[in-house]
Image (cartoon, grey):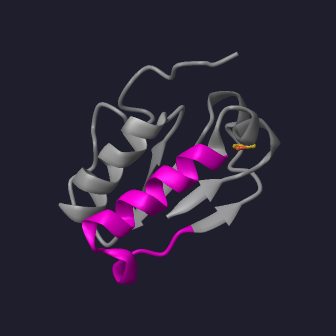
Amino acid sequence: MLVCTGGDCKKRGAKDIRKALKDEIRSEGILSEVRVDAVDCLGLCKHGPNIIVYDGADPKGTWYTGLDEDEAREVVGQHLKQGEPVERLAAGRRARKARK
Ligand code: FES
């Protein structure tokens, strides 16, 4: 998983999102199965906080943009733990919600 911690995403709460993701990964007991890397920018700065989840089923990755902490936890529980992307949150499968 790539978590953007660049300036725009940071302004929109990337630090809290990253913490929520890591806490939930730990809570779900999948810490040894998931790699979380921070990146400086994913190129969709105005839609952050942004993450990409890579798994064996989709080598292009699933983008999640504009996540809040509850949504981040949902991505861990459903996508990482159960292997099912959260369709309603995945970018390109929903209208992007631009943030200020
Ligand atoms: S700062 Fe996060 S996508 Fe650019």
Q: Quadrant of residue 11?
A: top right
Q: Quadrant of residue 47?
A: top right
Range of residues picked out in magenta: 15-36
14 over 79 or under it: above or below: above
Percent x, y of residue 41: 74, 51
11 over 23 or under it: above or below: above
Residue that appears at 42% across and 45% down: 72
Q: Is residue 20 magenta?
A: yes
47 over 77 or under it: above or below: above
Q: Is residue 18 magenta?
A: yes
Q: Nearer the viewer, residue 92 or 97?
A: 97
Quarter containing the C terminus? top right
Residue 90 visible from this viewpoint: no
Q: Nearer the viewer, residue 60 or 85?
A: 85
Percent x, y of residue 30: 30, 74
Magenta stretch, overall SS = helix
Percent x, y of residue 3: 59, 56
Is residue 75 toward the left or the right of residue 66 in the image?
A: left
Residue that appears at 57% across and 61% down: 2
Residue that appears at 64% across and 44% down: 14
Percent x, y of residue 63: 47, 46
Q: Nearer the viewer, residue 55 or 24?
A: 24
